[in-house]
Image (spheres, grey):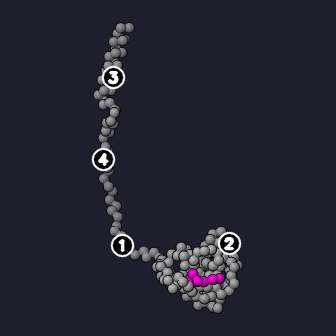
Amino acid sequence: MTHLHVFAVNEPVTISHTNLTRQKGEAPDLPPLAEWLGVETLDTDRIELFPLSELGGMALSDYIQLAFSPDEATPGDVQGRLDALEGAILLVPDTAMPAQPSPGAQLTSVATIALAQADHVASLPKADTTPAPPAPTPLPAEREGTPPIAFFALLAVVIFAALAIFIGWA
């Protein structure tokens, strides 16, 4: 199961490094986050670091719910701790680190939240691959308001007879 580690940053941070800033092509000069987390390497394309003031009026717990899709609803006590934070925040999923973090003095661990994942364990029946028989071709139906074919045949005979009489008198 993948988790999201939420850390309060104990250092002054004014930069933003989020999915949105990466999409805009921004590449701020990041502090030594791997060192702060106590890990050898850190995939900074998966983390988010930003001042909480950038959320405007949105609560941090709501932001995490929208941006990271936790597996379950955040418990009330954790939600309260998240929403009470001030300053800057560092959000790090397990997938960004090779090992569990052991943060230094620059970070305070606030919460670890389980993230939703696809389970890929569904057992589906095999699809029937035999071709279906072709559908019968419907016979053309006479449309309402259209004269029957016999009418056109009789009309042709009358016109032909009228032409024959006209040619015979000429």
CA–CA distance in space, label 2 to label 1: 44 Å
Mark number displayed over residue 38: none
Q: Is residue 99 visible?
A: no
- Extreme residue toward the top, this view: 170
Q: Relative to 143, is 122 above or below? A: below
CA–CA distance in space, label 3 to label 1: 68 Å
* 74 left or right of 89 in image: left
Quarter of the image for residue 40 reads bottom right
Quarter of the image for residue 48 reads bottom right
- Amino acid type, residue under disc 1 in the picture: Ser
- Amino acid type, residue under disc 4 in the picture: Pro
CA–CA distance in space, label 2 to label 4: 62 Å
Pinpoint residue 105: horizontal percent, then vertical percent.
Answer: 64, 91
Instruction: Name the residue rendered at 63%, 83% in the picture.
Output: 86
131 and 111: which is toward the camera? 111
- Local packing at callout 4 (Cα closer than 10 Å; few below 14, some 14-19, many 20+) is few
Pinpoint residue 32: horizontal percent, then vertical percent.
Answer: 67, 85
Q: Earlier in the sequence, mark 4 or mark 3?
A: 4
> Can you identify the residue that label 2 sits on?
26
- Local packing at callout 1 (Cα closer than 10 Å; few below 14, some 14-19, many 20+) is few
> Can you identify the residue that label 1 sits on?
123
- What secondary structure is marked by label 1? loop
Q: Nearer the viewer, mark 2 or mark 1?
A: 2
- Amino acid type, residue under disc 2 in the picture: Glu
Q: Earlier in the sequence, mark 2 or mark 1?
A: 2
> Can you identify the residue that label 4 sits on?
136
Mark number displayed over residue 156: 3
Q: Which residues are magenta?
A: 82-87
- Amino acid type, residue under disc 3 in the picture: Ala
- Local packing at callout 2 (Cα closer than 10 Å; few below 14, some 14-19, many 20+) is few
CA–CA distance in space, label 4 to label 1: 36 Å
